Image (spheres, helix red, strand yellow):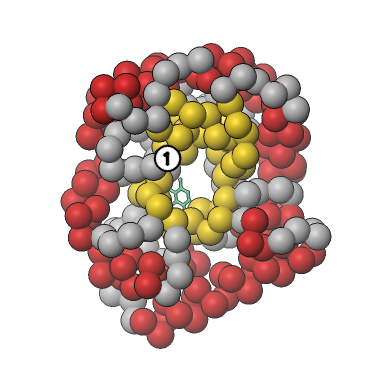
Amino acid sequence: MMEKLSAEEFDLNYKNVLKRLYAAAEKSGRKAEEITLLAATKTVDADTVNYAIQKGITHIGENRVQELLSKQDRIVGAHRHFIGHLQTNKVKDIIDKVEMIESVDSLRLAEEISKQAVKHGIVMDILLEVNIGGEESKSGFSPEETENAVRKTALLPGIAVKGLMTIPPVAEMPEDARKFFRNMYKLFIDIKGKNIDNSCMSVLSMGMSNDFDIAVEEGATLVRVGTSLFGRRVYK
Ligand SMILES: *Cc1c(COP(=O)(O)O)cnc(C)c1O
């Protein structure tokens, strides 16, 4: 767990994150209001998450099912996304607890989300996760197979395909991520331009604490920020 963050520390962190977001938007001729700041809340206690929501955080994301389930009842408000690797057999646990699953990395997972969504009489928003760096160790669709994956998932009942998400390769310098963000944006625009039936392609989720300014400059519509808001995570 994290060391408990003081209200003052969060306020200052939040102010700095917004400053970076606005600066990046301005630099690239975009409106900051069009970019969603999602707080990645792993290891952050429910009280701190609630405080962040009171202060203006509108979107939160968890990346582990267990942690999401243990905290969710104590968190008040905010749009909730799932942003981590999701095992097919865990879909049923979170299907009615989040509004969007950002990390759909296989057709099998999409099919299970579809099945569970239909069972609950809901439509789940999803993003397809793209392995933009072509890393062996990472899950996600390759850029080449992404369009076809959009076409296939868009046909599934109970699912609304809203866009793409990526985590670029770990980089020494934030600037190293720019080429991956740029390639993602190209892919996103290319697929969007095909106007695939039943898909909407309005969300491009990319950029984290180290590099979200660069992601915004390259076209992100949603950034996922943890450390810069809540401080370094300490796992015990
Ligand atoms: C933890 C996490 C983030 C935020 O990472 P930071 O570097 O702490 O900002 C973003 N996306 C995903 C999928 C995460 O798991």
Question: Which quarter of the image is occupied by the N terminus?
Answer: bottom left
Lateral position of residue 87 relative to residue 38, left or right: left
Report the residue marked by disc 1.
100
Q: Residue at x 60, y 31 (%)?
A: 200
Lateral position of residue 12 relative to residue 150, left or right: left
Residue 166 point in image, percent of width and height: 57, 39
Residue 214 point in image, percent of width and height: 69, 56
Q: Residue at x 63, y 62 (%)?
A: 33
Classify residue 53 by image quadrant: bottom left
Classify residue 6 by image quadrant: bottom left
Q: Residue at x 73, y 49 (%)?
A: 218
Q: Nearer the viewer, residue 167 or 128?
A: 128
Q: Residue at x 54, y 77 (%)?
A: 15
Residue 169 point in image, percent of width and height: 59, 41
Callout 1: few (<14), some (14-19), or many (20+) C-alpha neighbours within 10 Å?
many
Depicted 139 relative to depicted 56: above or below: above
Q: Nearer the viewer, residue 169 or 223?
A: 223
- Helix, strand or loop at label 1? It is strand
Question: Is any atom of residue 138 visible in this view?
Answer: no
Question: Is any atom of residue 197 visible in this view?
Answer: yes
